[in-house]
Amino acid sequence: MNRSSREKPFAIACERNRDPILTVLRQVLPERGRVLEVGSGTGQHAAYFSAAFPHLEWLPSDLPENLEGISLWREQAGENCLAPISLDLLADRLQLPQADAIVCINTLHIVAWQGACNLFEAAGRSLAPGQVVYLYGPYRYADRPLEPSNVQFNQWLKDRDPVSGIRNLDDLTTVARDQGFVLDADAPMPANNRSLCFRCVDDR
Ligand SMILES: C[S@@+](CC[C@H](N)C(=O)[O-])C[C@H]1O[C@@H](n2cnc3c(N)ncnc32)[C@H](O)[C@@H]1O
């Protein structure tokens, strides 16, 4: 992300992946209500998806240092793009704001594994049966080796921060199941990424 004062942060990956992701989001997001985006990053996705879903409220979130950049993107977005909130997946007893769906793109391989556990634990308390947690990113499958590009990416992640890394789908589905979610959809995406849709089936 390049950043100078009042200049919107920009990530080329967001430009590349936003339309493939949008196609999937059209299939999994609700007709109305509020979408909580976890790990919004630059804010590009929040601006783009809130425009694509004018009937939904889009609530971006990230660590405090990213909120200013997200707000700059929000200045050009519609009223349904809400002010970004601070949300740290590693917070003790993570509490999520009210939401009807959760979207988390390219974030669970950045944050320590506890962040993924916390996300599903909090989502299990916050979402109702039928509502979804949508994840996008690279994942590791038990029945096949990581693609060479993802082997390299995983090494890059580990060199940068040993607690990060490409997550095992089986570990995610286990954590999700323990919190009342089933893997409803798992779709291939460009550049060896996946779209995962976990649906809440348990009223807590
Ligand atoms: C690779 S970026 C992805 C950003 C954006 N979703 C995208 O696709 O461009 C990972 C994001 O995770 C956020 N992040 C890292 N640690 C986090 C934590 N503990 N809680 C919440 N977000 C975190 C970073 O600030 C960053 O915005």
Image: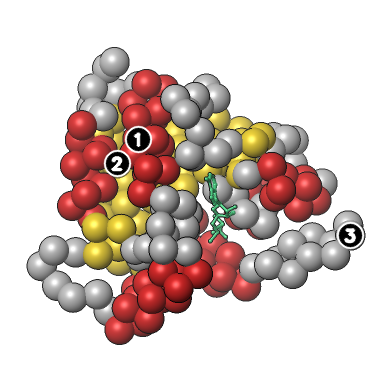
Residue drawn 49% across the image and 39% down it: 89
Q: Secondary structure at mark 1?
A: helix
**x%, y% of residue 17?**
51, 67
Other-residue count near label 2 (Cα within 10 Å), few / some / many at <14 / 14–19 / ≥20? many
- Residue type at tag 1: Phe
Q: Quick one: SS at disc 3?
A: loop
Q: Amino acid at mark 2?
A: Phe
C-alpha gap between disc 1 and disc 2: 10 Å
Looking at the figure, which quarter contains the N terminus? Answer: bottom right
Please say whether residue 129 is visible from this viewpoint: yes
Tag 2 secondary structure: strand
Q: Is residue 78 left or right of residue 152?
A: right
Residue that mark 3 sits on: 5
Residue depicted at 89% across the width and 60% down the height: 5
Tag in front: 1 or 2:
1
Q: Residues within 10 Å of mark 1 (few under 14, many from 20)?
A: many
Q: Are marks 1 and 2 in contact (CB under 8 Å)?
A: yes
Q: Please give left or right for residue 153 compared with residue 97 in the image.
A: left
Q: Is mark 3 within 8 Å of ligand 1?
A: no
User: Which residue in the structure is indicated by mark 2?
Assistant: 198
- Horizontal and vertical percent for residue 109? 41, 58
In what quadrant of the picture does the C terminus appear? top left
Q: Which residue is mark 1?
A: 120
Residue 47 left/right relative to 105: right
The mark nearer the N terminus, 3 or 2, is 3
Q: Residue at x 23, y 55 (%)?
A: 169
The CA distance from mark 1 to mark 3 is: 35 Å
Q: Residue furthest right?
A: 5
The earlier-in-sequence mark between 1 and 3 is 3
